Image (cartoon, rainbow, N blue to C red):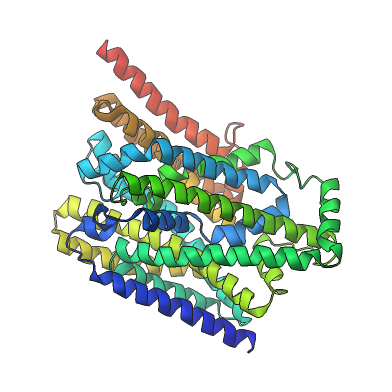
């Protein structure tokens, strides 16, 4: 069987199974926006966990992080493990409170949550607009990955067909039953992702060890700075890239929304445990793949690869055909899970926070508006993906950087409770979001996606500056509130 036939058959199998799963999920009754967007708060622990993990670990991992590790060394592992440890900490100590509040206050969208925390109804619209602007690049990065992956795995110039496949599958899998079809297909795709990653690293170790090339390469790497914090990872660069990732679990609505979904506290604890296992396994595999690839280049078994996003395709060009198409399809799956979740959460912001809050429509109409918005969002994403703006790594981190002002606003809202509704703090929440977001957006427009992350503002890493400014505004408001009280 040739590569094109094997690739198309594997893709077809993947899409058919996913679509069948999505259609089966329609049996779940969808009557309210809560049913549609947060599965009626009824997901099992294992379904919620794999859905959370699959949403979090996008095409950035098997494409972007492999390439980043190849180019910059073990510092990339520090960058990614910081995210994982931060997320585990936040899920362990904050998620139980958020989960309880979501049930008590009937939160459906994260924008609605922020508005409710501060008692400002229309704050949800501001947050929804921030989500839309910030997450379009991140979601489009997933479509770019799908297009490139389909092109790479088939060996044909069908980038646009890859984008079309992603859009159609996302429309069906997301619009059918909302979170139910999303979580069900996430579970299936998450298993595909982890099994493919395990198969990939086992093969790479075996193939690379032939003739001692891998070990020779690692000896050469040890003489360089790639097994430590290389010059690429200056303190400023590391901070700039890492800070948005540290607060990913708080700022990115597609994962915040997943915290609402477990059916009970036991399911929530299982979400945290299984996500930790998945995340640690996947992170170690992906970074080791990047290091092994670089070692093999140093040993001369592979050429030096100049473009980070091309590292995984180059490695897979030497793998057995069944493994190659299996791993390529797992990259499509990783991109799909993240894109689906972003599209669904943006849809909830449009239908729940913009439509229902402004016009007071019924749940039935809101769900219809949500489905229409899913289609509209996918059309926009496909246009952005067609333009191929930026690298996957940069688009992914840029999205979290633009969302950074939500970190202090959300965390302070969670911990202050009713005190967050005092006048100074309410006004500060709006000011913090506007100032922080506009600073990040202006910097990105001025310097571009990649340079905006590593170009300092007032001598500080740009993401640290944004976080400090937004946090300072909130802290000053809290101080003012305490002074007025006394």
The one of 193 and 367 positioned closer to us in this rendering: 193
Q: In the image, is 444 to the left or to the right of 295?
A: left
Q: In the rendered image, which quarter is residue 52 located in?
A: bottom left
Q: Residue at x 20, y 66 (%)?
A: 29
Q: Residue at x 47, y 63 (%)?
A: 190
The one of 87 and 215 positioned closer to us in this rendering: 215
Residue 282 rendering spot, x and y as whole percentages:
57, 55
On screen, residue 162 above or below 466: below
Q: In the image, is 23 to the left or to the right of 292?
A: left
Q: In the image, is 8 to the left or to the right of 101?
A: right
Quadrant of the frame with the N terminus:
bottom right
On screen, residue 480 above or below 57: above
Q: In the rendered image, which quarter is residue 290 located in?
A: bottom right
Residue 142 shows in the view = yes
Q: Residue at x 65, y 58 (%)?
A: 66
Q: Residue at x 48, y 42 (%)?
A: 88
Quadrant of the frame with the C terminus:
top left
Residue 176 shows in the view = no
Furthest residue toward top: 486
Residue 104 rendering spot, x and y as whole percentages:
21, 41
Residue 241 rendering spot, x and y as whole percentages:
58, 44
The one of 446 and 357 positioned closer to us in this rendering: 357
The number of numbered discs placed on residues in the rendered structure image is 0
């Amino acid at each position: 069987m040739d590569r094109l036939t094997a690739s198309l058959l594997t893709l077809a199998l993947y899409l058919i199974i996913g679509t069948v799963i999505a259609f089966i999920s329609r049996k779940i009754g969808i009557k309210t926006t809560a049913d549609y967007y947060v599965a009626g708060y009824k997901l099992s622990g294992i379904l919620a966990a794999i859905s959370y993990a699959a949403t979090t670990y996008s095409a950035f991992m098997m494409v972007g992080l492999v390439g980043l590790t190849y180019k910059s060394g073990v510092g990339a592992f520090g960058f990614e493990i910081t995210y994982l440890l931060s997320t585990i900490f936040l899920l362990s100590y904050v998620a139980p409170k958020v989960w309880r509040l979501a049930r008590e206050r009937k939160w459906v969208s994260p924008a609605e949550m922020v508005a409710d925390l501060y008692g400002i109804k229309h704050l949800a619209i501001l947050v929804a607009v921030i989500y839309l602007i910030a997450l379009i690049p991140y979601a489009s990065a997933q479509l770019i990955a799908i297009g490139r992956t389909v092109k790479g795995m088939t060996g044909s110039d069908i980038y646009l067909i890859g984008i079309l496949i992603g859009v159609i599958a996302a429309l069906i899998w997301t619009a059918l039953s909302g979170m139910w079809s999303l979580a069900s297909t996430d579970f299936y795709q998450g298993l595909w992702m982890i099994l493919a990653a395990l198969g990939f690293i086992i093969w790479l170790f075996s193939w690379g060890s032939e003739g001692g090339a891998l070990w020779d390469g690692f000896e050469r790497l040890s003489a360089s700075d790639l097994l430590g914090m290389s010059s690429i990872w200056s303190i400023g660069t590391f901070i700039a890239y890492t800070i948005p990732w540290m607060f990913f679990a708080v700022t990115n609505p597609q994962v915040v929304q997943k915290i609402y979904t477990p059916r009970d506290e036991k399911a929530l604890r299982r979400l945290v445990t299984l996500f930790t296992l998945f995340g640690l396994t996947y992170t170690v595999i992906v970074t080791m793949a990047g290091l092994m690839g670089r070692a093999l280049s140093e040993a001369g078994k592979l050429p030096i690869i100049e473009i980070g996003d091309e590292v995984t395709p180059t490695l897979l060009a030497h793998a057995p055909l069944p493994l190659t198409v299996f791993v390529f399809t797992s990259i499509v799956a990783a991109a799909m899970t993240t894109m689906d979740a972003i599209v669904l959460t943006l849809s909830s912001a449009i239908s729940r926070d913009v439509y229902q809050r402004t016009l007071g429509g019924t749940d039935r109409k809101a769900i219809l508006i949500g489905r229409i918005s899913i289609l509209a969002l996918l059309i926009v994403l496909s246009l952005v993906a067609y333009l191929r703006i930026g690298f996957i790594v940069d688009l992914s981190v840029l999205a979290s950087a633009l969302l950074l002002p939500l970190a202090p606003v959300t965390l302070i809202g969670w911990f202050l409770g009713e005190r967050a509704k005092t006048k100074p703090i309410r006004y500060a929440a709006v000011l913090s979001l506007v100032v922080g977001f506009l600073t990040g957006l202006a910097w990105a427009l001025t310097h571009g996606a990649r340079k905006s992350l590593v170009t300092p503002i007032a001598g500080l890493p740009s993401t640290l500056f944004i976080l400090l400014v937004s946090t300072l505004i909130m802290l000053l408001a809290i101080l003012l509130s305490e002074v007025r009280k006394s």
